[in-house]
Amino acid sequence: MSFISKEKTAPATYKVNATISAEDFGKALDAEFAKQLPSITMPGFRKGKAPRSMLEKRFGESVFFEDALDALLPEAVATAIKDAELEPIFRPDNLEVDELSKEKGATFSFTVIVQPEVEIEGYKGIEVEVPSADVTDEDVDARIDELRARNARQVEVALRPAQDGDIAVIDFKGMLDGVPFDGGTGENFELKLGSGQFIPGFEEQVVGKQPGESFDVNVSFPEEYHAEHLAGKPVVFEVTLHELKAEELPPLDDDFAQEVGEDYNTVADLKKGIAEELVDSKKQASDDALDKGVQDKLVELLQGEIPQEMFDRRTQQNIEMFLERFQLSMERYAEIFGESPDALTARLAEQSTMQVKVELALEKIALLEDFTPTAEEIEAEQQRLAEQYNVPLQRVKIAVPEGDIVKDLNRVRALEFVKGTAIKA
C-alpha cells in the first residue's frame, strides 16, 4: 500500500491518490477465498471442496475482488492519509477505484476535508451595543401597570360613544362588490379598539359610534394579505355595535399584591419582588446581547476559505436535532407548522453557517492566546457530561474524544476572553 499524491481541489479539501500492491491484493484474494470456501457449494464437488480455478472459471476471475478490496481499503485509506500528512475532520468521501486487477493491484482515490486555515485580528476591545441592566422605579411601575391590566375587569359603558381602549361587542358582515366573502362575518365579537386586531382603518371607524347603532365601515385589505382574492381589495363591512365595555384596573393596594403572589403581603413586597425579577431578566438580556454582539463581530472579523461541506453537514445535523425535538418527520412538520422543507432548511442553514464560523473564530483565538485546559479542567468537564446524561464517567471518557472536550473548553474560554475585553456601548 502506498501514497501517490494529493491535490487541493477546494478550500481545505484534498483529493488523495493511492495504490494497493498486486502482492497485497493477491494475499487478500487468498484470504477471502479461504474464508468463503467452507460455505460454497458447486456441482461435482463436496461443499467447501471446490477448487478456486473452477470458481473463477464459472463466476469470473473477479469473483472475490470486491470482498478482498473491502477488507484492504480501511487500512489503505488510513495509511494514505497518514503519508499525505493530512488530518481529516470528517470521514473520507468520494472513494473511487480507478484500476483493479491481480497483475497490478488497485489504484484508488478519495477526498478528505481538513481544518480550514483561518485568520482573525481585532478581536480584543470589540465594541458591542448592550442594553442597560439597571432597573429604575419607572421599570417597576410599568410592570405593575401590566399586572393591573392583566387583572382588569370589564364593566359596561353607557351614555357615551366608543373610544380607544373600549371593548366593542359587534356583529359584522364583510362585502366584496356587494357579495359576502368567506371569513368576513362575526356575531357578538369582542373587539378592543386601538388594538390593531382588525384591518387597518376598521377600528377607527367604530370609535365615536353609540351602542345600538348600525353603520358601514369602508376599508381595503393590505396588498400582502394572505388571501389573494382579497389582497388590496376595497370592501364594506356592515357593522352593528351592541355594547361597549371598559377595562377597570384594580386598585394598587395590599389586597392586589396578595392576589398577584403568595410571597407578597404588601405593595412594598410586590415592588421589591418585581425589582428583583427585573434585575435578573435585564441582566440576562444584557448578557445575551453581549454574547450575540461579540459573535456577530467575530464572524465579520474571520478571514479564510471554509469548505461548504462544513456548513452542509452542520445544517443536516441541526435539521435532524430540530425534527427529533418535535418527534416529527420533515413532511409532518410542514403540515403542522406551515413551513416548507426548503424554508426550514434555508433557515437552519443560516444558523449553521453562523455556528461554524463562530467556532472557527474561537478556536483560532484560543490558539493565538495559547489556551490549554488543564487535566483537572478536562476531568471536570467529563464529570459534568456524565452527570448531565446520567451515565458513568468511564463511558463518557470512551465515547467522547478528549480532543473534542479540549476544543469545547477552549471555545468557552476564548468567548469569555473576548467578552471580557469588549467595550459595552
Image (cartoon, rainbow, N blue to C red):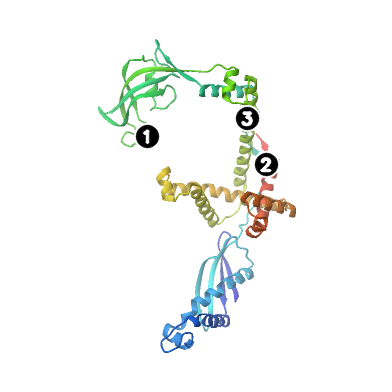
39 to 198, vertically: above or below: below
**Residue where numbered disc 1 is placed:** 225
Question: CB under 8 Å between callouts 2 and 1?
Answer: no
Foreground: disc 1 or disc 3? 3
213 to 177, vertically: above or below: above
Work out how far the residue at label 2 is from the one at label 1, CA to CA, in angstroms: 43 Å
In-image side of 196 versus 398 (left or right): left
Camera-side residue: 308 or 402? 402
Residue at 39% over, 23% down: 190
**Residue where numbered disc 3 is placed:** 277
Work out how far the residue at label 1 is from the one at label 3, CA to CA, in angstroms: 39 Å
Which amino acid, by three-letter code, is at mark 1?
Tyr
Q: Which secondary structure lies at badge 1?
A: loop
Residue 382 seen in the figure = yes
Residue 268 lies, in percent from the top left, at: 65, 20
**Residue where numbered disc 2 is placed:** 419
Q: Which residue lies furthest to the top in this view?
A: 159
Camera-side residue: 354 or 150? 150
Residue at 63% over, 69% down: 82
Residue 291 lies, in percent from the top left, at: 62, 41
Q: Quadrant of residue 251?
A: top right
Work out how far the residue at label 2 is from the one at label 3, CA to CA, in angstroms: 24 Å
Mark 2 nearby-residue class (10 Å; few <14, some 14–19, many ≥20): many
Q: Quick one: label 2 or label 3, which is nearer the N terminus?
A: 3
